[in-house]
Image (cartoon, rainbow, N blue to C red):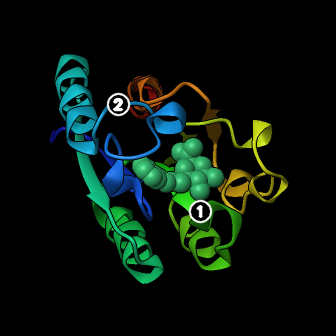
Amino acid sequence: MSVQEILVINGPNLNLLGQRQPEIYGHDTLASIEDKCAELARELGVSVRFGQSNHEGAIIDLIHEAREKSAAIIINAGAYTHTSIAIHDALKTFDGYIIELHISNPHAREEFRHVSWISSVADAVMAGAGAYGYELATRLAAEKIKAD
Ligand code: CA2
């Protein structure tokens, strides 16, 4: 049987991680987060694939691709979390396990970040653990897909 895949989707501006606003988002880059998750996934007997886009449609394409290829999605939709019914609808078509992830805790920030179009279609929500949240989410997703 082939190794099950977790797709980690990152939305707008997250390609700048580690370069700006470290007081909110920390010093880790997306590449270093990907390396840590890949190593963890190897230990856990699953695989992870990272995708990032600043474009809503490209994020939806990644979700559609996951319908064929992935057992779980970890998604940090960035600011689209608070606006995108299209991403909400796309996630609804995915049959696997979904984790909504945020580096910061949006509930402790501006009021416009308190609304999420992702939470209602996610199986789990992780927020405020910093970049470490990606490793926690990878561990959770691996456990869930291996139990299936
Ligand atoms: O805390 C999170 O992970 C967020 O999803 C990040 C989004 C924000 O709009 C959400 O409310 C919470 C913003 C991502 C911006 O990423 C940057 C990274 C480095 C420098 C500047 C922005």
Describe the element under mark 1 as helix, strand or loop: helix
Q: Which amino acid does label 2 sit on?
A: His
Which of 44/129 is in front? Answer: 129
Amino acid type at circle 1 is Ala
Specify whether residue 148 is in view.
no
Q: Quadrant of residue 121?
A: bottom right
Q: Mark 1 points at which residue?
A: 79
Cα separation between marks 2 and 1: 20 Å
- Mark 1 CB near ligand 1 (8 Å cut): yes
At which x and y percent is residue 106?
70, 43
Give the quadrant of residue 61.
bottom left
Residue 118 vertical placement versus 124 (above, below): below
Residue holding disc 2? 27
Q: Which residue lies furthest to the top in this view?
A: 43
| Front-lying residue, 35 or 17 | 17
**Sequence-first disc among 2 and 1:** 2
Percent across and percent down for residue 76 are: 50, 51
Q: Nearer the viewer, residue 44 or 35?
A: 35
Residue 10's x, y, as percent?
40, 55
